Image (cartoon, helix red, strand yellow):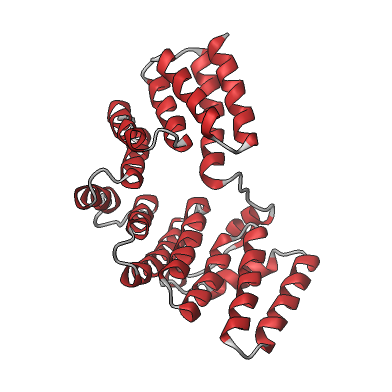
């Protein structure tokens, strides 16, 4: 692999994360929470995150604690479900802003229990999934995965035909595999591909997993299928450009990075793509 490929791939990885996670970053306190945690394995895997929340609170600044305290006082004082939901949304959003999505997910789960909608449970599961992607501690990943799966199961129960919930549940198992069935996530996505043939979201995630395992030709096949359905999908253009780069197809790499640039509305992402294209063309 040439120095140019290394440089482009390095930039592409960062850009890929930006495309998927909107440039979200951890707070400085997140690493300290990971290092300072001294919890039993039982509490980590049971789905009870009360000790995690207590630990997280210790890492907050006085100003952050004050902000949360004010919001919690509002939540404790309201008497209607509508007001309670709005107060919990504010608390969940604040924890997310602090860079601690696991706790944000805990409050999103409380909101879902009140709203009783598939959308609300999907938001709770997605928030837990973001935490899964950031956690390093494997025992905690197991506990948070279980919380996410619970939320997505609730969402699926309420909206059984909404494939996004089923995809997200499968991706939880990819992110934190079961010890006795490490392929559960991938197998679930393959089953979804059979159940929902030519679904672009299923195909895209199968393509993304093919990339992660170095099956670039398979990734290209699946991502081309996505683009045959929606030729303006910037994420699919970006990912297939990476796949073509790995296989040494410079012309196709440039073609799809340019298509991503033309269809992405994220100016930060577009700036990075222009840098990558400049490196490829010069």
Is residue 44 shown to the viewer in this render? Answer: no
Q: From this viewpoint, which residue is outermost toward the bottom?
A: 79
| The C terminus, quarter of image | top right
Is residue 260 shown to the viewer in this render? Answer: yes
Q: From this viewpoint, which residue is outermost toward the right?
A: 63
- Quadrant of the rendered image containing residue 214: top left
Residue 70 percent coordinates (x, y): 75, 77
Q: What's the residue at 54%, 27% (across, down)?
A: 10
- The residue closer to the viewer here, 222 or 198, is 198
- The residue closer to the viewer here, 182 or 278, is 278
| The N terminus, quarter of image | top left
Residue 189 percent coordinates (x, y): 27, 49
- Quadrant of the rendered image containing residue 218: top left
Residue 254 percent coordinates (x, y): 48, 18
- The residue closer to the viewer here, 234 or 170, is 234
Q: What's the residue at 24%, 47% (across, down)?
A: 193
Residue 216 percent coordinates (x, y): 33, 27
Seen in the picture, residue 144 relative to 226 is either above or below; the reply is: below
Seen in the picture, residue 98 relative to 55 is either above or below; the reply is: above
């Amino acid at each position: 692999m040439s120095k140019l490929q290394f440089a482009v791939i390095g930039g592409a990885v960062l850009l890929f994360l930006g495309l998927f996670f909107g440039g979200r970053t951890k707070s400085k306190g997140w690493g300290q929470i990971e290092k300072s945690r001294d919890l039993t394995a039982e509490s980590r895997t049971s789905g009870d995150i009360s000790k995690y929340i207590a630990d997280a609170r210790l890492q907050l600044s006085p100003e952050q604690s004050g902000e949360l305290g004010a919001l919690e006082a509002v939540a404790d004082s309201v008497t209607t479900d509508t007001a309670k939901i709005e107060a919990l949304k504010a608390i969940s959003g604040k924890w997310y802003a602090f860079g601690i999505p696991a706790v944000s997910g805990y409050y999103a789960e409380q909101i879902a229990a009140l709203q009783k909608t598939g959308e609300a449970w999907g938001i709770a599961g997605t928030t837990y999934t973001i935490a899964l992607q950031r956690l390093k501690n494997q025992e905690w990943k197991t506990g948070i995965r279980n919380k996410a799966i619970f939320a997505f199961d609730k969402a699926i129960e309420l909206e059984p035909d909404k494939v996004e919930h089923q995809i997200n549940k499968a991706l939880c198992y990819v992110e934190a595999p079961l010890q006795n069935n490490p392929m559960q996530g991938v197998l679930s996505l393959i089953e979804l591909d059979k159940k929902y043939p030519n679904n672009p979201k299923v195909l895209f995630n199968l393509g993304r997993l093919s990339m992660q395992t170095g099956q670039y030709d398979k990734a290209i096949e699946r991502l081309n299928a996505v683009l045959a359905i929606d030729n303006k999908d910037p994420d699919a253009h970006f990912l297939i450009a990476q796949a073509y780069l790995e296989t040494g197809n410079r012309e196709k790499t440039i073609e799809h990075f340019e298509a991503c640039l033309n269809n992405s509305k994220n100016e930060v992402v577009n700036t990075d793509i222009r840098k990558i294209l400049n490196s490829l063309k010069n």
